[in-house]
Amino acid sequence: SPMRITAITLLLVLQGALPAAAAQRSILLLAPTAFDARLEASHEAISHWNAMLADLGVETRLGTPQVVVESPVARALENYARRISQRVFRLPAGAAEPRPPDELTSLDADIVVLLSRQDIMSFTWPMPKVDPPRYFVVIRSVRSPDRDDAMVSRHVVAHELGHAIGLVHNADPHALMCGPCQPLTAESDATGFLPLTDLDRARLVELHGGR
């Protein structure tokens, strides 16, 4: 199903990779057009995470994204995204892992979200050889009618941002951080999103501090 494909992350966030005591994570959102439906989905996903983090009593928040349309660095980032997607499920190869392009590392944000023009797998990727850790999130293009669903886009963005704040896949096919997912039988909770599991909540508190 489309959501099962788009919600898969090529790389699980490495434990301990998040910078300690970073109260707000800055986000740069790169979009191909000002009318891309994924822009609204991204804002909704960010708001959802901030509500969840506040509910958990942690200080970490996702910042209001800086939105750039038709960025001159988009082509370089699209090429890098395609290279990563072709790795499928391989983990970074340590010293052999190529550096991300300067066009990406020079961007001033903890999380760079690319609303891709490509029909590739959505993923979250810790930028190798970058300190402190930063994340490159790619959200695949929405081109066919069966993918043109605001709920799907919101969940895909929220899922990938979940990886960027430290969550990994869980075995619940109806949870936000599912892997794999079963969207046809999943139901959103009162927030309009799929729920977090108790283990997800506990991990966020462990990583970010809270009650």
Image (cartoon, grey):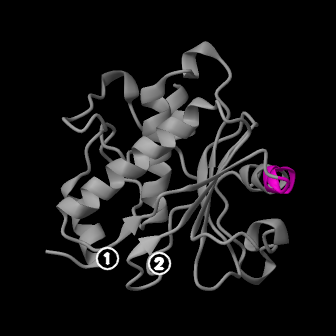
**Left or right, residue 180 beside residue 202:** right
Find disc 1 in the rendering and name its residue: 208
| Residue underneath mark 2 | 18
Question: Residue at 56% across / 16% down in the picture?
Answer: 146
Secondary element under disc 2, as helix, strand or loop, is loop
Q: Which residue appears at 50% of the width and 51% of the height?
A: 160
Q: Main secondary structure of the magenta part?
A: helix
Q: CA distance from mark 1 to mark 2?
A: 9 Å
- Vertical order, 78 against 35 (above or below): below
Which amino acid type is marked by label 1?
His
> Decide: marks 1, 2 in contact (CB < 8 A)?
yes
Left or right, residue 8 beside residue 29: left
Tell me if I can see residue 27 in this picture: yes
Identify the magenta region: 72-78
Pick whichever of labels 1 and 2 is earlier in the sequence: 2
List the single residue furthest toward the left: 211
Query: Relative to residue 68, is residue 20 drawn left or right?
Result: left
The quadrant of the image that shows the C terminus is bottom left
Q: Amino acid at mark 2?
A: Leu
Q: Position of residue 90 (x, y in %)?
A: 67, 61
Q: Quadrant of residue 94?
A: bottom right
Q: Residues within 10 Å of mark 2 (few under 14, many from 20)?
A: some
**Which residue lies at the image location 63% right of the left edge and 32% below the top edge?**
36
Q: Residue furthest top?
A: 145
- Confirm whether the magenta stretch covers residue 34: no
Q: Nearer the viewer, residue 60 or 160?
A: 60
